[in-house]
Amino acid sequence: MVKLKFMNQSHPAHDPLLDGVRGGAVLAVVLFHSSLIPVQKLADKILHGAALSGWAGVDLFFVLSGFLITRILIQTKDSPGFFLNFYMRRILRIFPLYYLFLFLAFYVFPQVVSFGFTYWTFLSNILIGRLGHFQSPVLDITWSLAVEEQFYLLWPLVVWIFKKENLPKIAVAFFLVGFASRVGLFWLGASPIKNYVLLLCRVDSLAAGAWLACRLDALRPEFFKKMFYLMLGVVGCVFAWDVGLDSPLMRTLGFSANALLATALIGCSCKKEISVLNSVFGNRFLQVCGKYSFGMYLFHVPVIHWLFSQLRWGSGFFTQVLFHVASVLTTLLIAIIVYHGYEKHFLKLKKHFENSPELVTPVPT
């Protein structure tokens, strides 16, 4: 949970609705990976198809990450400890739980993979892209974290070098680079997995979040509302055409459309513009999932596979629902235990790397 020292009262330091957005993203991913129950009837297939679209939660994670990180970077740009504080807070947020997960995956419940060092060095997405396929359901979930960590190496330097008024244009340029990279790889006949896991092909989502951070306070709420409904229609058409990750439409236009929809959704949530979204992301359960989303994301795949292998589930609509619920609740329980027993002790150390309030740049209205 990222807390920002916003000085604009219209967008407080910690917005619970963004916890709900994060919770929605992680739930979508859990539902996607827990779509293991055989389907037979039409109702089964509808539920199964809806759950299979949950991979788009990763796009929402990327946009939200780009948004929150850029807000932090913009506000602390002129602080003496700009790089040190940013990277130390990221390390304390990511490394302890991430490396605990890797330790368990490699040494307690051993996973057999090639080039294991890439998982320890946040290069697993490059390995997967090079191989052209995923190796391990448990370990390969780290590809998205690798994308974000690689972006964190580049973007703070961009924010520090360029003037704040130029950042929206740079973010748009990054967005176009991501889109063009996917189109280029598609026409070159590259493996679909490259379009999905490489930073160059997914930077449009992170850049969309960065653009939102720069422009949120300058744009009216109506802009995000119109953008949301427009992109909801576009994404709906794309998913109706083919929900698969390897479809030509998804590999080219689809990911960028998802990013723009997520951008509009986050913008509407910050502006409190659409009452339905306010109600959905104001849900207490979603906000709890958002608080523990990192642990849920890392541990949900082994939890799901353990539940599926240990119990006889059968098939059918209600069996699907039961398995989804069991996967979500078990994953959440483990994430809560890990957070309070381990993770939060490292997060407390972040207080040693905060910028002084008087050095935080006000966010313009």
Image (cartoon, rainbow, N blue to C red):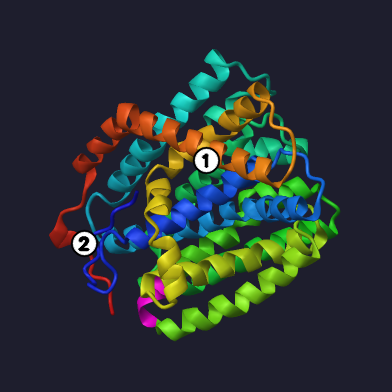
Q: Which mark is residue 127?
A: none
Nearer to us in this view, 242 or 112? 242
Q: Was residue 215 drawn as part of the magenta stretch in this picture?
A: yes
Residue 348 point in image, percent of width and height: 23, 37
Q: Is residue 200 visible in this depiction of the protein?
A: no
Quadrant position of residue 249 = bottom right
Q: Residues within 10 Å of mark 1 (few under 14, many from 20)?
A: many
Q: Who's the residue at 22% across and 53% down the image?
A: 80
Q: Amino acid at mark 2?
A: Val
Mark nearest the camera among 2 and 1 is 1
Find numbered disc 2 in the image and state the secondary structure of the residue it sits on.
loop
Find numbered disc 1 in the image and state the secondary structure of the residue it sits on.
helix
Identify residue for label 1.
328
- Whether 154 is drawn above or below 75: the answer is above
Residue 353 point in image, percent of width and height: 23, 43
Quadrant position of residue 228 = bottom right
Q: Amino acid at mark 1?
A: Val
Identify residue for label 2.
360
Q: Was residue 267 drawn as part of the magenta stretch in this picture?
A: no
Q: Who's the residue at 29% across and 70% down the image?
A: 11
Q: Main secondary structure of the magenta part?
A: helix
- Whether 238 is drawn above or below 355: the answer is below
Which quarter shows the C terminus? bottom left
Residue 135 point in image, percent of width and height: 71, 30
- Whether 218 is drawn above or below 61: the answer is below
Residue 346 point in image, percent of width and height: 29, 32
Mark 2 vs mark 1: which is more N-terminal?
1
Q: Tell me where the magenta segment starts and ends, as one range.
A: 214-218
Distance Cα–Cα, label 2 vs label 1: 38 Å
Please state if 204 lies on the left or on the right of 183 as rendered. Answer: left
